[in-house]
Image (tube, rainbow, N blue to C red):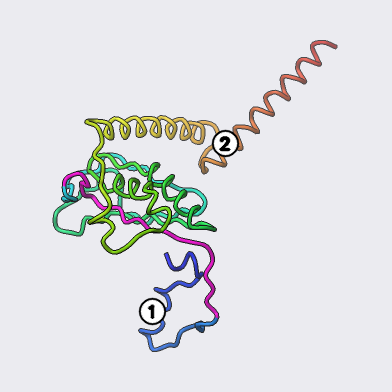
Amino acid sequence: MTELVTGIDLVAEQLRVAAGEGLSYRQEEIALTGWALECRIAAEDPFNDFLPSLGRVSHVSEPSGPGIRVDSALYAGAEIPYHYDPMVAKVITWGRTRDEAIERMRRALREFIVIGVETNIPFHLQLLDDPRFQAGRLHTGFLENDFSLVAPQDGEEERAALLAAALLSHRRRNLLGVEAGLFGNGGGWLAAGRLAQAREQSWATRGREWRRSTG
């Protein structure tokens, strides 16, 4: 997260120091740019005292976009055992302002879908929605004394997650069909661009045929 606001890779600097080298920068050379937030995603149930949620992950859809970074160990079929720490991913957002970083985090967490185990994403979302958090009115006892997690209505989260997963799966299948069936390998943006180009070429061909037929 520090790298996003300083441009400095602290891990690389730690390795240099461990190897007996000096730091590659001076304190006065460090300039902070923008704001960054990090939410640690854990396989635990925030509505059941944050107990670990064990099992097999059946579906994962991670967020992306400007100012969003995801460091993740999740994939469909992954097993969440009790042997290790329940943290499975980190979502990091950067914004020119704190409000922008918060808004990007809210969007990213809403797009982060994990089916098969519970996660603490709902906790992060409710915290980000709290006006006191948004205003920066925080203290070390905020979560314990001032913040209350609101449980969802029965089945509400599961229905929303399943619907989102179905829509994403349908969209992905359609996109892969476009890429594989029409254009070969490539990313989604490439496929969309080529599809638009194909449509333009199709209309141009129809226009030429129409002009020939009308003389």
Which residue was labeled with disc 2? 192
Q: Is residue 144 left or right of residue 165?
A: left
Indicate whether residue 58 is drawn in magenta: no
Determine the residue located farthest toward the left in the rendered image.
82
Q: Residue 185 in the image: state x and y as whole percent.
A: 51, 41
Q: Is residue 199 left or right of residue 82?
A: right
Residue 108 x/y as whole percent: 42, 47
Task: Answer with the quarter of the image where residue 82 lies.
Answer: bottom left
- Point 41% across, 29% down: residue: 170
Q: Is residue 36 magenta?
A: yes
Q: Magenta residues, as a range?
A: 29-48
Secondary structure at numbered mark 1: helix
The one of 34 and 52 positioned closer to us in this rendering? 34
As measured in the structure, the alpha-carbon distance from the residue carrying label 2 to the one carrying label 1 is 43 Å
Residue in the picture at 21% in, 49% down:
44
Q: Which mark is residue 14?
A: 1
Q: Nearer the viewer, residue 137 or 1?
A: 137
